[in-house]
């Protein structure tokens, strides 16, 4: 798997090869570990050994620990005193249901508010984020999947930002919802069907139609829930 470093256009191989020295080494290491977590190469709940990552990625301990610290802040990695790091456990069915109940309570209404306040600048930001999800550069499925998960989180966060309610936005972000639910299933259906649903949301925003935006967001979240429920079978 290869990741392109946007700051210096040097390639790295985060999944199975060595990372080349670069000006943003911590970012490269973070992307490598993030991709492995999202694609389940690092299994939920499994121990993450710093020394193993040092050997795999051919970097020192410092960028590994910095990257793991960032992932800890995003809820994807847990650190236990005197024991070390492990991947966050997979969310339970109950937690999954609670997260989607929260999303259905907050995001459709937020989408309606965002549509009412939409302008061309905001719409361009959302289209750019959606475009990032649709791009399929590179051959590595894990990298594309992890990129989609991040872009999806940004897309939904931007909508809540444009709804102009900081408390709702912070509440959703604090749950790290998108990262946890995308770890449930590494499958193309999770991403491909979501793209069409995002287009429906964007169309409602382009029309500045709050009712349509609310309906499109509700449908998207419900379909996302139904797709990922299969992970609990």
Image (cartoon, rainbow, N blue to C red):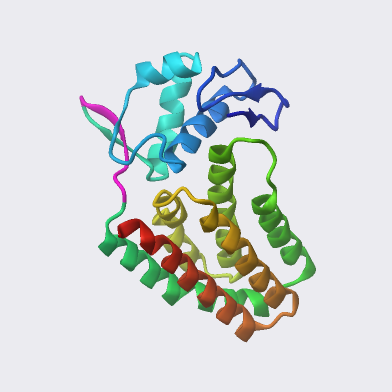
Looking at the image, which residue sits at the far front? 233
Q: Nearer the viewer, residue 73 or 134?
A: 134
Q: Where, quadrant-wise, is the N terminus in this rendering?
A: top right
The number of callouts visible is: 0
Q: Where, quadrant-wise, is the C terminus in this rendering?
A: bottom left
Quadrant of res 87 = top left
Give me the residue at 68% from left, 68% from top: 199
Image position, residue 140 (x, y; %): 59, 35
| Residue 191 higher or lower than 35, as above or below | below
Give me the residue at 20% from left, 24% from top: 82
Please say whether residue 14 is visible from this viewpoint.
yes
Image position, residue 134 (x, y; %): 68, 53
Looking at the image, which residue sits at the far right? 120
Q: Nearer the viewer, residue 142 or 198?
A: 142
Image position, residue 54 (x, y; %): 43, 16
Q: Nearer the viewer, residue 151 or 16?
A: 16
Which region shows up in magenta? 82-90
Quadrant of res 17 = top right
Does 143 sit left or right of 180 as displayed?
A: right
């Amino acid at each position: 798997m290869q990741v392109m470093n946007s700051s210096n256009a040097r390639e790295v191989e985060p999944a199975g090869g060595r990372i080349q020295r670069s000006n943003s080494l911590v970012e490269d290491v973070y992307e490598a570990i993030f991709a492995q977590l999202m694609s389940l190469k690092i299994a939920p709940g499994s121990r993450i050994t710093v020394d193993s990552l040092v050997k795999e990625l051919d970097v020192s301990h410092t960028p590994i620990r910095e990257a793991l610290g960032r992932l800890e802040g995003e809820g994807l990695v847990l650190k236990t005193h005197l024991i070390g790091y492990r991947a966050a456990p997979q969310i339970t069915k109950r937690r999954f249901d609670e997260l989607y109940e929260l999303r259905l309570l907050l995001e459709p209404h937020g989408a309606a508010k965002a549509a009412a306040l939409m302008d061309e600048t905001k719409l361009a930001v959302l289209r750019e984020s959606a475009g990032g999800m649709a791009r399929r550069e590179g051959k590595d499925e894990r990298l594309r999947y992890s990129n989609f998960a991040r872009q999806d989180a940004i897309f939904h966060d931007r909508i809540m930002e444009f709804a102009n309610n900081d408390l709702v936005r912070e509440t959703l972000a604090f749950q790290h919802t998108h990262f946890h639910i995308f770890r449930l299933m590494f499958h193309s259906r999770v991403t491909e069907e979501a793209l069409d649903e995002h287009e429906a949301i964007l169309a409602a925003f382009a029309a500045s139609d709050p009712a349509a935006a609310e309906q499109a967001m509700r449908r998207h979240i419900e379909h996302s829930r139904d797709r990922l429920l299969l992970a609990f079978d």
